[in-house]
């Protein structure tokens, strides 16, 4: 049984991923949730997380509010993808469960220290909280089990700029810190997403299913689909965060490669996740030149493919 802490910005695909993990009771124990700005601001993502916990009957779980702003760059959100309320502008109830007393970075530190080598972190939003937790208590890098991240676009274009995926773009400095912290990182980025498109027929079943979070998936989906239609995608949907969740449940259905990566923090390619095959900017045999970037190049396991029918079967089993 994996003990999982989810750091999230719900979010249509975040909702889908959370629903999958709650339904996979035999494989995963979700032990807490923290929130982050990203799709919308953190006040709204925290509200949404509390609404989802209530709907799922998980009011015993901590919902720890995270960072309101990125480390360096200005706040930027994506209401045009997820709606002004982050849930496709569906009508939302007022949540009643309280927020956790601690802020996200401290809650994450505490849970890792209390469960050495047992916690899998699942960040599916910008990485600010995870970077802050590491900066406040670097020991967590040795004590966490694994960090499975939805972020990056290694051998494919970005989705928010030609170079960058949205979670890395929204806080590139945090992404660079987290990717080079020295803990075991698995990157479920955009590379694997095109193999995980969910067809309309399965979506219809998921939306109609008698499952706790189905009304939220169904309610948020039309806005997201309208956004996808502007790109000519009519009959299927990709849920990037769901691929990261699926990796926790069925790692064997993914094809991955370990690569040294550098995360760009400035300029037109801000947020780009760049493979550096030699692990060095430049091989200087006399070692009389030092590149600042070299210190930030670090290995990650990157998911490049998933067995599409196995992924869809997993969704069907959990959510339909
Ligand atoms: C990521 O950005 C957000 O829009 C999604 O929730 C996902 O985490 C995809 O780039
Ligand atoms: Ca997300």
Image: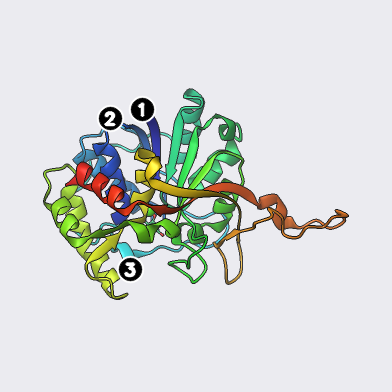
Q: Is mark 3 within 8 Å of ligand 1?
A: no
Secondary structure under tag 2 reads loop
> Could you say whether the residue bearing mark 3 is in a helix, strand or loop?
helix
Residue designated by label 2: 26
Decide which of 288, 317 is in the foreground and name it.
317
Q: Position of residue 65 (x, y in %)?
A: 40, 43
Mark 2 neighbour density, 10 Å: few (under 14) some (14–19) many (20 or more) = few
Q: Which residue is mark 1?
A: 1
Q: Is residue 59 left or right of residue 122?
A: left
Rendering quarter of residue 268: bottom right
Mark 3 vs mark 2: which is more N-terminal? 2
The residue indicated by pointer 3 is: 80
Q: Provide residue 28's location: percent of width, then percent of height.
A: 33, 33
Q: Is 217 on the left or on the right of 172, as rendered?
A: left
Residue at point 18% right, 55% down?
A: 202
Q: What residue is shown at x 28% (from left), y 30% (from top)?
A: 26
Give the mark nearest the N terminus, 2 or 1.
Answer: 1
Residue 78 shown left or right of residue 267 in the figure: left
| Quadrant position of residue 275 | bottom right
**How many angstroms separate mark 2 from mark 1 (CA)?**
7 Å
- Whole-percent x, y for residue 35 in the image: 39, 46
Residue drawn at x 17%, y 42% as measured from the top left: 212
Q: Can the viewer see residue 34? A: no
């Amino acid at each position: 049984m994996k003990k999982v802490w989810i750091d999230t910005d719900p979010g249509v695909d975040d909702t889908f991923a959370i629903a999958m993990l709650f339904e996979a009771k035999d494989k995963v124990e979700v032990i807490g949730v923290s929130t982050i700005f990203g799709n919308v601001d953190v006040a709204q993502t925290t509200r949404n997380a509390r609404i989802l916990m209530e709907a799922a009957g998980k009011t015993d779980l901590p919902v720890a509010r995270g960072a309101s702003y990125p480390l360096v760059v200005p706040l930027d959100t994506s209401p045009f993808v997820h709606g002004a309320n982050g849930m496709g502008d569906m009508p939302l109830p007022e949540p009643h469960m309280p927020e956790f007393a601690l802020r996200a970075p401290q809650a994450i530190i505490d849970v890792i220290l209390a469960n050495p080598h047992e916690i899998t972190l699942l960040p599916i939003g910008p990485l600010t909280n995870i970077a802050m937790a590491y900066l406040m208590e670097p020991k967590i890098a040795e004590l966490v089990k694994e960090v499975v991240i939805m972020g990056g676009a290694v051998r494919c274009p970005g989705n928010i700029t030609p170079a960058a995926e949205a979670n890395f773009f929204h806080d590139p400095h945090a992404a660079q810190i987290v990717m080079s912290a020295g803990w075991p990182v698995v990157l479920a980025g955009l590379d694997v997403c095109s193999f995980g498109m969910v067809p309309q027929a399965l979506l219809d079943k998921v939306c109609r299913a008698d499952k706790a979070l189905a009304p939220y998936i169904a309610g948020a989906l039309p806005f997201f689909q309208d956004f996808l239609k502007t790109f000519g995608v009519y009959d299927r949907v990709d849920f990037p965060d769901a691929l990261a969740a699926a990796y926790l449940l069925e790692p064997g259905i993914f094809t991955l490669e370990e690569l040294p990566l550098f995360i760009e923090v400035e300029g037109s390619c801000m947020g780009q996740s760049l493979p550096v095959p030699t692990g060095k900017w430049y091989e200087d045999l006399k070692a009389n030149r030092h590149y600042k970037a070299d210190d930030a190049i670090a290995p990650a396991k990157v998911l490049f493919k998933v067995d599409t029918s196995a992924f869809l079967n997993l969704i069907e089993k959990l959510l339909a």
